[in-house]
Image (cartoon, helix red, strand yellow):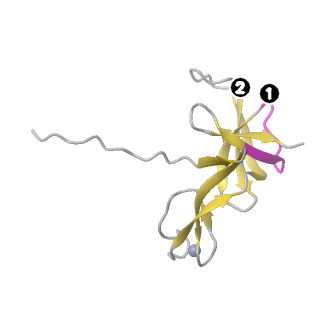
Amino acid sequence: MMDREPTVTPDPRPRVETVSGSAAVVGVRCGTCAYPTFAALIRCPVCGADTESSRFAPTGTVFASTCVRVRVPDRPSPRGLAYVDLRDGPRVLVETPIDESPVQVGASVTITGVNGFGDLQGSVDS
Ligand SMILES: [Zn+2]
């Protein structure tokens, strides 16, 4: 019987870097058509050109949101989830604060970092 090394799958979620107290989502941008993605792709999924490393602004607009009431161990319930279109970057899934109702579509959200589970966390701008 052959021993095999376990397959390590990279975490597919967006990564955040914090520089001087400000969070930024990291990813790549196409050098030709400027398509942004948080996935570490070598080639653009739209036009096939080479991509370049990029950091995206932590602010964006809610595209869609929901309130999750299903209880998951160690997670708050209810909790908010929103797809946020970053101002100069891709659409990302963000855990948002909630008070029994989802964040309004069109609201401004700022990515504040990553929670203990590795999920993007954001706050709603007033
Ligand atoms: Zn492209």
In the image, 5 versus 47, the foreground residue is 5
Image quarter of the C terminus: top right
Left or right position of 14 against 102: left
Check the image and report above or below for 32 versus 68: below
Q: Which residue is mark 2?
A: 78
Check the image and report above or below for 117 versus 40: above
Q: Secondary structure at mark 1?
A: loop
Q: Which mark is residue 100?
A: 1
Check the image and report above or below for 116 versus 5: above
- Magenta span includes 79: no
Image quarter of the N terminus: top left
Magenta span of residues: 98-111
Would you identify the image quadrant in which residue 28 lies?
Answer: bottom right
Q: Amino acid at mark 1?
A: Glu
Image region (quadrant) for ligand 1: bottom right
Q: Amino acid at mark 2?
A: Pro
Mark 1 touching mark 2, by CB under 8 A? Answer: yes
